[in-house]
Image (tube, rainbow, N blue to C red):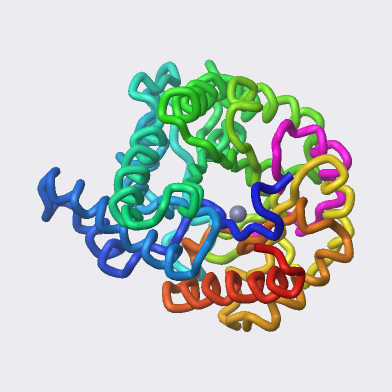
Amino acid sequence: MQPRPLRTTIIGSYVFPSWLEYCSGNLGAFGSAEIEEMQQDAVVTALHDQLAAGLDVITDGEQTRFDFNLSFYGYIDGIELESKSPRLHGPPAHDQRGKHRIVGELAAPRGLGAVEEFERLKHLADDLLRDVPKDKRPTLKASVPGPYTLSGRLLPNAQYADRYAITEALLPIVRAELEKLVLVAGCTEVTVDEPSMSCYAHKEDPKRFVDIFNRTVEPIVGRTRLSTHLCFGNFKGHAVGPRRYAPMFPAFLDMNVDEVHVEMASREFAELEIIRTIAERRDVAVGIVDVKSYYVETFEDIADRVRRCMEHAPPERLSFAPDCGLSQTARWAASRKLANMCAGVKVVRDELGLE
Ligand SMILES: [Zn+2]
């Protein structure tokens, strides 16, 4: 059950402020101390917008993954970075991200960086929230991509014959990171993102995905609040899979998580009844803010959408979030959308007399 009925939450990423976008393309102009400062300032910026909106759950906005060396692939040994995008011109989309070659044994002796990110988030949030009693503070959530999604940008070779072989090599790496994040760093809420599973469930075996997912999260099940985010892709604001949940269910109900997030706003709430099925076994986080549209939902729109969801699932099972991370939405829109989402949920909470 939700820690708070009709909880407000967020998917991991948040848009980079424009200065960070510029600086990350000119990192050679900065020293290592300045880059660390840049990382901290970026997280503070993301925290500012989330705290101003009044979310129950906040993240570091994945603000520090602005450079290859600071992203997950930069932590994995045995990879040769793609040298050039396969498509340089035309409409921005996912096909402009190439694949990295595997040139050795896949290993991550320094981990994947998520633990350091969470420690930084804890430290900065403590500082910003020092006047707020601990039990009134928002929950700090970490997001980590799963091995199947990570494998999607690596090319199979003689040693790793196909995407599933690469996934199996990455699985213990992600599992170890999750273990450290929860059991050592004390992270109480984690999302394991496997968007590739939701994008490709229509053509792969969804039960095989569930088995991969459950083996990945096995050491942290019951030790943290665990969720997953089932979206259809949002790189440069574009989807990549057929945007239907039917191929995933009922198989995905066996994913060993507390909460399942589904993308509803951009799909005009098609298949909303799926949240009834999910809520029979899990909590459900409903995407009620369209991160791809520059129509800014009003708080009245949000309140209507919350009421509509309550026709299918009880408040103790429900939380609300944007459809996906807000990394591909301009900041002025992202911050207004978040603020209106929280205000709209509050309207319904007040109607129901919820605290
Ligand atoms: Zn997503």
The spot of residue 143 in percent (x, y) is 51, 43
Residue drawn at point x = 87 percent, y = 51 percent: 246
Residue drawn at point x = 55 percent, y = 57 percent: 56
Depth check, front residue: 331 or 348: 348
Residue drawn at point x = 45 percent, y = 31 percent: 186
Count of number-bearing discs: 0
Visible in this render: residue 255?
Answer: yes
Tell me if residue 256 is in the magenta stretch.
yes
Tell me if residue 248 is in the magenta stretch.
yes
If the picture is divided into quarters, which one holds ligand 1? bottom right
Residue drawn at point x = 48 percent, y = 54 percent: 136
The spot of residue 103 in percent (x, y) is 40, 23
Visible in this render: residue 157?
Answer: no
Image quarter in which the C terminus is found: bottom right
In the rendered image, the vertical position of residue 213 relative to residue 66, given as above or below: above
User: Which of the 4 image quadrants contains residue 314?
Assistant: bottom right
Q: Is 266 on the left-hand or right-hand side of 171?
A: right
In the rendered image, the vertical position of residue 200 relative to residue 186, given as above or below: below
Depth check, front residue: 45 or 318: 318
Image quarter in which the N terminus is found: top right
Depth check, front residue: 352 or 176: 352
The spot of residue 94 in percent (x, y) is 54, 56
The spot of residue 278 in percent (x, y) is 83, 47
In this picture, which residue range is highlighted in magenta? 239-260
In the rendered image, the vertical position of residue 144 relative to residue 212, given as above or below: below
